[in-house]
Structure formats: structure tokens, C-alpha cells
Image: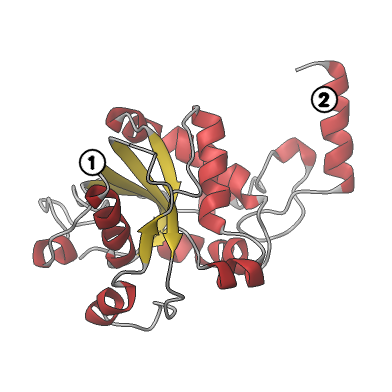
Amino acid sequence: MTIITKMKNSLLRLLFPLRCPVCDGIVRHSEGKICAHCEPRLKLLTPPWCLKCGKKVEDGMSLCEDCQRTGHTYDRGRALYEYSSAAPGLYRFKYSGRQEYADFYADQAAEYLGEFIKSVNPDALIPIPLHPKRKNKRGYNQAEVLALRIGEKMDIPVYSDLLLRSRNTRPLKRLSRQERQNNLKNAFIIRQNDVKLGVTILIDDIYTTGATIDEAAGVLKAAGAREVYFLSLACGAGV
């Protein structure tokens, strides 16, 4: 990095200071992209985890209770944080315009999930799409912002326009597993039929039951994808 580039970056940080993805306070330039005292508050998902969805499990378990009960269309997935530790920041990232958090999240994903990402050797990253009406109202798709940052950092193509959310589905937060599945049925379509991908990683912010990932994975596999994995920023407990 040249001296001029460093000066430009410093000036930009003064004019547009970064916000901490934990406390939302202004991050001092010397601290990077998160307050030094806040970083330990984010709890990384550590082993043992479910070999299918990546949720935290108890010692001796290979699959979480969810994955023992339910078959999934996707092949495998991983998440970065325990949901409870990251929830306030994820809410601001999703609904309050804090797109700059994606730079920190991408750094963490590359550092702690980079081995997983490289091991599946993806042809592309594909963000879970928002319906156009919801994206226009919010101004951006947080999954797309995250996918673009991870793709840039790890030199992986990102296809933001491959999947289209054709139905403006109900919010999933208060729906049961069966209601989620019914709500998401036929919610996605392939927009670019000329793109052929063998291995893909779906990118989303939060993994709960896997209904969204399963529906998207089914559409991709029907279009010729051989393997579909996912990466999310957080997920809940699996026991």
C-alpha cells in the first residue's frame, strides 16, 4: 500500500468513521474494524458442531437434533457465530443500513471459515436473494453485500443475479418449520439459464431451520448444480 493510499484511507476514516459491529460505536482507526474490547463478545462457533448444518452440539453428537429429524437438500454448511452473541449487530446490518459491518464479517469468515470454503472448491458464491419490493424498501440485500466482500477477499466469483426471489414471502421469524417450508415453496427461480455451476456456496446472514437454504439449493440442483453448500454469519443451538 502506497503512502498516498494510506493517506486517502485515513481521510476517509475521518470523514466516514466505521461503526463497531458489536456496540455500534465509532471505531478508532488504530483498532481496525471493531472495538478492541468488543471483539471477545462475539462468540465463534467452535467444535463440536453438527457435521451437516454446523450448529453447536454436545460432545459425542455428529448431527444436531434438527438434522437428525429432517433431511436437507443442501450438502453441508457452516456458520461463524453463536446467534445470541451476534444478534444485535446482525439486526443493524440487516435493517439499519450498517453495510460497513460486512468488511469485518468477511475478514472473520476468511480467517475462520476459509479452510471450509477452500475445501469445497466453489465455482461461485450465491447470496440468498430478497424479493425486489423488499430490497427496494431496504435499499440493499445484506446477503449480497456479504457475499461480495467474501468473494473479493477470497477471489471467488459472486453471482448476485442467478437466483431470483419470485414471491414476496412472509417473514420467517415466528413461523414453525412446516410453515416456513410452505411459505418458501416455489419462492426462488433461476434468472440466468446460461450459467452452469458445479459447486456453489449459498450466502445468508442467519441459519435457523434450513428451510430457505433447502429451497434455494433445490432450485440450483434442478438447474444442474452438483453440490450446494451454505455459509451463514450465525445460527442458533442445535441441541
Dot 2 alpha-carbon crowd within 10 angstroms: few under 14, some 14 to 19, many 20 or more: few
What's the residue at 59%, 44% (across, down)? 104
- Would you identify the image quadrant in which residue 89 lies? bottom right
Three-letter residue code for mark 1 = Glu
Which mark is nearer the camera, 2 or 1? Answer: 1
SS for dot 2: helix
Quarter of the rendering containing residue 210 = bottom left
| Residue 39, image x, y percentages | 57, 48
Residue 225 on image: x %, y %: 26, 42
For the N terminus, the image quarter is: top right
For the residue pair 226 and 79, the one nearer the viewer reads as: 226
- Amino acid on which disc 2 is placed: Lys
Residue at x 47%, y 59% (from the top left corner): 129
Residue 227's disc is 1
Which residue lies under the disc numbered 2?
A: 6
Q: Relative to 219, does residue 106 appear above or below in the rendering?
A: above
Between the C-alphas of marks 2 and 1, the distance is 41 Å
Residue at image point 10% right, 51% down: 60
Taking 20 as reference, is 165 left or right? left
On the rendered structure, is 16 left or right of 79? right
Q: Position of residue 70 (x, y in %)?
A: 13, 65
Residue 78 appears anywhere in the view: yes
Give the quadrant of the C terminus.
bottom left
